[in-house]
Image: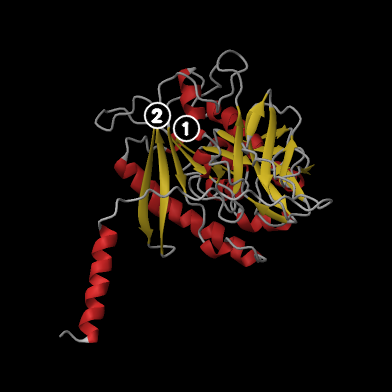
Amino acid sequence: MPSRRHASTTAVLIATIALSSLPAVAQSPAAPSAPASPAAGAAQAPVPPPATVIVSPRVQAGRVTIAYRAPSAKEVVLAMEGTPRLPMVRDEQGVWTATTPALAPDFYGYSIVVDGVGVLDPLNPVIKPNLLNPSSMVHIAGPSSGAGQLPWDPAAVPRGQLHRHFYRSALVGDDRDYYVYTPPGYDARAATAYPVLYLLHGFSDDASGWISVGQVHVILDNLIAQSKARPMLVVMPLGYGAPEIVSRGPRTPAVWRRNIERFKQTLLNEVVPAVERDYRTDARRERRAIAGLSMGGAESLFVGLNSLDRFAWIGAFSSGGLGQPGDLPELFPTLDDSANSRLSLLWIACGTEDRLIEANRHVRSWLTTKGVTHEDVDTPGGHTWMVWRRNLATFVPRLFVDRPIS
């Protein structure tokens, strides 16, 4: 006789078999429960509007609209090169916008100042590079052809090439670079030798400044295609003989002096020999020019006027960094009217609204007392690339010719 435990197990097995033999019964999913009705008089939460698609910058008929999402910001301001600061207006989704008046065709750098802190436009991939104060950049194109076409707007013309070189500076003790523009048709295997313009950037820029912001390659392509400039090489070195000068803190006169003197050594002893080794250059002094903006303008004057055995053409745009007027005799100890027989052009330009206009006028006056012939050029504008692009486009046609090309 089976035990009670065996009998119990048998009963369970019989019950399980019986259940498994029954037909399957489909189960309908439970109907979703209706949302509870709000109590009478209870306020319902507002439905948020769909997020706005932000586009920035937008250019229409010369007017630039900048948009920036900052729901928690208290104040947002648009700071754009060459224009007054514009307060930005916040919408209900926390998007701040501002639209400029109609602007002349050009490249404009800008920053968005959020509660006192300048930031890049996160929706704009075009950057105006700078070692201390990078910003965003927007282009307002001018006419694509005709008299109103700007030299820095691309046109359907033959293109030159840009080359980047890296080297170790034994004089400064760092790794640095320089760029070389070669004109359309340049052939390293041909016998043609080209004149060279050494073009220097300003303080806190890097060696690419004249390319990325100044559009030097476009300017040269267009001027050469229009027979307004001679085909030439343009060399753009890193302009720091004392790299420690690139800082936000105070910079002593001693650092400025060390920077300019050591830069002269790196240019003459490292960059120029390398360029003349690697490219088809005309190494005569009459076929070398040097020019630059701001700090680079001061360096151009310092290097050029103290090296008239190397350079016959000198340009300075908004020069800054030569110190006080009383420092000039020490910076140019041998300069006198004998320089005139070796200078093909000494061209000194500055914007009339530039904070450095008086310093440039002091330099011009001092040169006059020394009997050195120079050409003074005052142009509308401040300390901006909008002035320096125009300076370059005016200066280049003067180079390596007895008279301007017409």
Which secondary structure, mark 2? loop
Q: Could you tell whether 275 is left or right of 406 in the image?
A: left
Question: Mark 2 sits on what residue?
Answer: 160
- Does residue 49 appear to the left or right of 125 in the view shown? right
Q: Nearer the viewer, residue 240 or 73?
A: 73
Q: Amino acid at mark 2?
A: Gly
| Colour scheme of the picture | secondary structure
In 3D space, how far apart are the residues under numbered discs 1 and 2 (Cα atoms)? 7 Å
- Which residue does the numbered mark 1 point to in the structure image? 217
Q: Residue at x 65, y 40 (%)?
A: 50
In the displayed structure, 254 sits above or below 76; it is: below
- Residue 230 occupies quadrant: top left
On the rendered structure, is 42 left or right of 247? right
Percent x, y of residue 136: 60, 43
Q: Is residue 273 above or below residue 378?
A: below
**Tag 2 or tag 1, which sits nearer the N-term?**
2
Image x and y of residue 273, in percent: 36, 48
Vertical position of residue 153 compared to residue 180: above or below: above
